[in-house]
Amino acid sequence: MAPYAQQVLISTGQRDWRSRIEEDGLDQGWGILGSRLKKLMFRTGKYADPYNNIVITNSSFIPSTDKSDTSRASALLFPSFKYIPDIPLNNDGLDRFVRAFLLPLIPHRAHEILPADKLEAMKRLPELQPTFKSMKSIDQSPTVLICGHGGRDKRCGVMGPLLESEFSRVLKDEGYTVGDTPVDRLNHANIGLISHIGGHKYAGNVIIYIPRSLRFNSGDVNALAGKAIWYGRVEPKHVQGIIRETILNGRVIKDHFRGGIDGDGTVSWLSAAHKFMLLSFKIGSDLGGQAFEPRQGSP
């Protein structure tokens, strides 16, 4: 997996998309959001920055706005752990959204040669965040994302819903409520299918975002709080072990581990995947948790 600063999870209310998501939903708010963000953030866009990797992903989460409303859309941001249910899609609204949430707090040192005014324009402005009055933090509910992009890879279109169903079943058995509308509350998990993201050739790809305030039954904060853990080649038979070890006990499963993202939204390309891959061989200080050989009954 490639490191990234933020993942923008657009709430589409759909469970599959065209192969190229920027060509889908252009008559609906969610499609307009994805298309316009890519134009702003990528290639020659106004805020394009090779050192600020933003991943734009469609999700099956139900938007808070009407899908037919072409003036507004909803999205989750990780690892900022924020839900913005009402994003204006006019030029001013999208510009504010990017500057409030998606730019780096400190631009990469390679930009230090730029004039001061241009350097300033590349910085995030957190003071703009309160202008999104319906913004919510995801502090207690883990978020499980499963690649189910059948329009891109039929294998994901088959495996994704199976994994979604199994994560839902096992989490309910563990006393969680689950849902496809992003909420934040104790003993609740948000589970969604997502579009394809680079770096995997096989089905069964899962990203788990552990919120900063998630606690063990003992009352201690989960050792992986604030992190994203990427797992690959996950099958339904592995789900119980993943939930038990990663969500409930704060441990990384070596056999499925593909990488991780740390930080509070200020992660840069320097948080390279190799730092996380060290977890496959030793206790990892980066994640605050540990990698381990799965014990009997684990995946």
Image: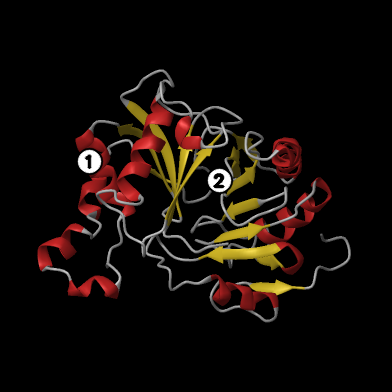
Q: Position of residue 176 (x, y in %)?
A: 66, 42
Name which quarter of the figure residue 109 lies in. bottom left
Residue projecting furthest to the top:
68
Q: Is residue 65 left or right of residue 183?
A: left
Q: Position of residue 25 (x, y in %)?
A: 46, 26
Q: Would you call the spot at circle 2 few (<14 residues within 10 Å), some (14-19), or many (20 or more)?
A: some
Towards the viewer: 105 or 156: 156
Up-down relation of residue 99 to residue 173 (above or below): below
Residue projecting furthest to the bottom:
282
Towards the viewer: 210 or 228: 228
Q: Measure the alpha-carbon separation of dots 2 and 1.
A: 27 Å
Q: Residue at x 31, y 61 (%)?
A: 104
Q: Quadrant of the N terminus?
A: bottom right
Q: Residue at x 30, y 56 (%)?
A: 103
Give the amino acid type for the residue marked by disc 1 in the picture. Thr
Q: Position of residue 120 (x, y in %)?
A: 16, 62
Classify mark 2: helix, strand or loop.
loop
Q: Quadrant of the C terminus?
A: bottom right
Q: Residue at x 48, y 34 (%)?
A: 11
Q: Position of residue 144 (x, y in %)?
A: 61, 47
Give the amino acid type for the residue marked by disc 2 in the picture. Leu
Tell me, yes or no, whether the two marked residues, 2 and 1, touch with CB atoms within 8 Å.
no
Up-down relation of residue 159 to residue 231 (above or below): above
Name which quarter of the figure residue 191 lies in. top right
Disc 2 target residue:
186
Which label belongs to residue 176? none
Disc 1 target residue:
131
From this viewpoint, is residue 48 visible?
yes
